[in-house]
Image (cartoon, rainbow, N blue to C red):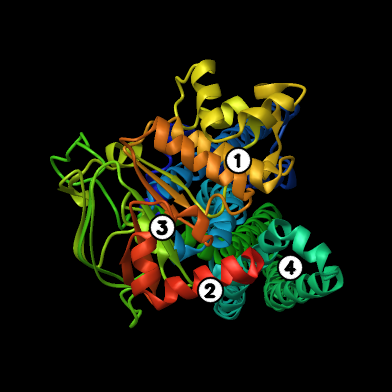
């Protein structure tokens, strides 16, 4: 897990190493200062000091203090650079890894969970790493030096640390043992909270349309309060660290003052004097302070361990779909063959989404697909560009199994306009050029005319330079669909898939789009998924999907004679109107 994170350091290894060296230097100096101070106090006590030696020792202490300050300040700068750099690299690597995921990988994590990992979890990692490379280096070194010097200067008086340190360590272990489960629960609930936010923002029109604002606020409050309860429970355990620390600190001070003073007064201190006893108090304070800092690190690591685990899961995830060795880099044509294809979204799922599909589509053909909700229409076409891989059988494009193609080559040859149309923030031109980054203005206009989008785009004051707001919220559903179709056409694909992507346009515009397809891209294989019979009735072949299988296939006239499902839908739509079919 930590090796996975380590690989993300890259150019920030040197700031990390320099931070460690600075902290080691500071620890050494901090351990030397009480020793020099004790010697100075002892000499003053014995009247063995003159003004020149006093000034010399004072100057040495001043220099050591300034050097320690320099090391500490510089370490703060380099640790911040290393931690923020690590966070940047981890964020980049996670995002890059997500881009390689198949839909099945994204389904495994869920979108809200990936958002949490890219934000909250990486912030936790950044804070933990900055503290680790500073305190986790300084504190152990300070402990070793301070304990060593305490035994050198205090002798048996330092044995109190044999009692104090185990007590404090045991308390810290118990805190971590009971706090960790609460922190684990919190991050899982963060995922659900983000999911609630995402659903609410995306469905804001529905929420307002049904006047469900109060219900959504109550649901969000419940989720947020659930997180608060777990955090409160964890924090109640973690705050026990402070009283344990104070107990050990005061015990150490009382022990040294009581027994150290007794040894000095009775003269049985085996040479211990006031200076050495004062240094013992300083070293005792240093030891316990370092233990306290280690406890802070322990708490931080307890909180961030789950974040590191979740980040590592994403970075270690192997994409379910990847390029084969010696991949084919050319798609010959748009012919498609499904050969005994079955598909499950998960190996754990008993029921197949698609079962025993066999189908041949010649290049340039127009194929219509209809079927009820849940009949796996979208699943069928998502196998063509390898958004998912078949569980059994094979899908061939241009006479070659899609699993043998270079992914980019295959997907550049297949253009999909999905059910959920997405436009990105930027101008209409920038959105269209997702289809072809080098497309000229004339090509943009041609594609928009074919998609019946040119007229409404030209009506905007800024035309093709009109800004699209996030999610395409400043254009209608029909306009968004037509822009997405134009974007797909700019790819000049061998296969064009429209997944219910004309549902928001009127029947006249739908007919014009289909007419444009027949006249201007006759060699492109066109697959049209639709709810309206009118959108597919002039297709070369129409597939009727039912329960993950092809229930019937044929032309419009053939299906009216042979398919009860097709005939029933047709009669509902022609007699009862499109609203009935919906």
Give me the disc on residue 162: 2
Which residue is pictured at 58% across the width and 35% down the height?
452
The local secondary structure at tag 4 comes to helix
Label 2, label 4: how far apart the Cα atoms are = 17 Å
Label 1, label 4: how far apart the Cα atoms are = 73 Å
Label 3, label 2: how far apart the Cα atoms are = 57 Å
Above or below: residue 468 compared with residue 229: above
Q: Nearer the viewer, mark 3 or mark 2?
A: 3
Q: Are marks 2 and 4 in contact (CB under 8 Å)?
A: no
Q: Are marks 2 and 1 in contact (CB under 8 Å)?
A: no
Which residue is pictured at 86% across the width and 69% down the height?
211
Q: In the rendered image, which quarter contains the C terminus? A: bottom right
Task: State the image coordinates of residue 569 (x, y, percent, origin top left).
Answer: 51, 71
Which residue is pictured at 58% across the width and 37% down the height?
483
- Quarter-of-image position of residue 389: bottom left
Give me the disc on residue 103: 3
**Residue under numbered circle 1:** 423
């Amino acid at each position: 897990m930590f090796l996975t994170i380590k690989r993300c350091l890259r150019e920030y290894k040197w700031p990390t190493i320099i931070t460690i060296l600075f902290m080691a230097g500071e620890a050494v100096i901090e351990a030397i200062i009480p020793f020099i101070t004790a010697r100075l106090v002892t000499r003053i006590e014995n009247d063995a000091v003159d003004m020149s030696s006093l000034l010399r020792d004072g100057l040495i202490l001043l220099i050591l203090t300034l050097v320690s300050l320099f090391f500490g300040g510089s370490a703060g700068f380099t640790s911040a650079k290393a931690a923020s750099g690590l966070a940047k690299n981890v964020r980049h690597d996670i995002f890059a890894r997500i881009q390689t995921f198949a839909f099945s990988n994204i389904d495994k994590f869920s979108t809200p969970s990936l958002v949490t990992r890219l934000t909250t979890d990486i912030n936790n990692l950044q804070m933990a790493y900055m503290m680790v490379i500073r305190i986790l280096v300084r504190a152990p070194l300070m402990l070793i030096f301070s304990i060593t010097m305490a035994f050198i200067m205090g002798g048996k008086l330092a044995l109190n640390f044999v009692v104090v340190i185990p007590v404090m360590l045991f308390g810290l272990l118990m805190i971590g043992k009971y706090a960790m489960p609460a922190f684990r629960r919190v991050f899982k609930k963060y995922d659900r909270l983000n999911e609630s936010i995402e659903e609410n923002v995306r469905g804001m029109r529905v929420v307002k349309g049904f006047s469900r604002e109060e219900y959504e606020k109550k649901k969000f409050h419940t989720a947020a309060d659930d997180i608060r309860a777990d955090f409160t429970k964890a924090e109640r355990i973690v705050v026990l660290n402070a009283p344990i620390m104070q107990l050990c600190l005061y015990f150490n001070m009382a022990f040294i003052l009581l027994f150290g003073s007794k040894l000095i007064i009775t003269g049985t201190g085996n040479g211990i004097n006031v200076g050495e006893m004062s240094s013992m108090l300083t070293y005792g304070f240093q030891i316990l302070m370092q233990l306290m800092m280690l406890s802070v690190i322990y708490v931080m690591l307890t909180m961030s361990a789950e974040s590191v685990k979740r980040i590592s899961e994403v970075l270690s995830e192997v994409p379910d779909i990847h390029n084969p060795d010696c991949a084919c880099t050319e798609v010959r044509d748009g012919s498609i063959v499904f050969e005994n294809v079955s598909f499950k979204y998960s190996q754990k799922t008993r029921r197949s989404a698609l079962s025993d599909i066999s189908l041949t589509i010649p290049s340039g053909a127009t194929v219509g697909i209809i079927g009820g909700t849940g009949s796996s229409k979208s699943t069928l076409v998502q196998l063509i560009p390898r958004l998912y891989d078949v569980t059994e059988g094979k899908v061939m494009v241009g006479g070659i199994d899609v699993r043998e193609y270079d992914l980019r080559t295959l997907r550049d040859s297949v253009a999909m306009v999905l059910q959920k149309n997405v436009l990105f923030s930027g101008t209409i031109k920038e959105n269209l050029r997702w289809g072809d980054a080098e497309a000229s203005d004339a090509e943009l206009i041609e594609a928009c005319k074919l998609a019946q989008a040119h007229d409404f785009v030209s009506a905007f004051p800024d035309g093709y330079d009109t800004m699209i707001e996030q999610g395409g919220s400043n254009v209608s559903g029909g306009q968004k669909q037509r822009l997405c179709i134009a974007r797909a056409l700019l790819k000049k694909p061998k296969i064009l898939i429209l997944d219910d992507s004309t549902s928001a346009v009127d029947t006249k515009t739908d007919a014009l789009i289909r007419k444009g397809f027949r006249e201007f891209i006759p060699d492109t294989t066109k697959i049209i998924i639709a709810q309206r019979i009118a959108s597919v009735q002039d297709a070369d072949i129409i597939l009727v999907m039912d329960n993950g299988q092809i229930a019937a296939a044929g032309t419009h006239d053939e299906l009216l004679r042979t398919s009860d499902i097709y005939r029933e839908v047709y009669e509902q739509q022609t007699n009862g109107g499109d609203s009935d079919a919906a």
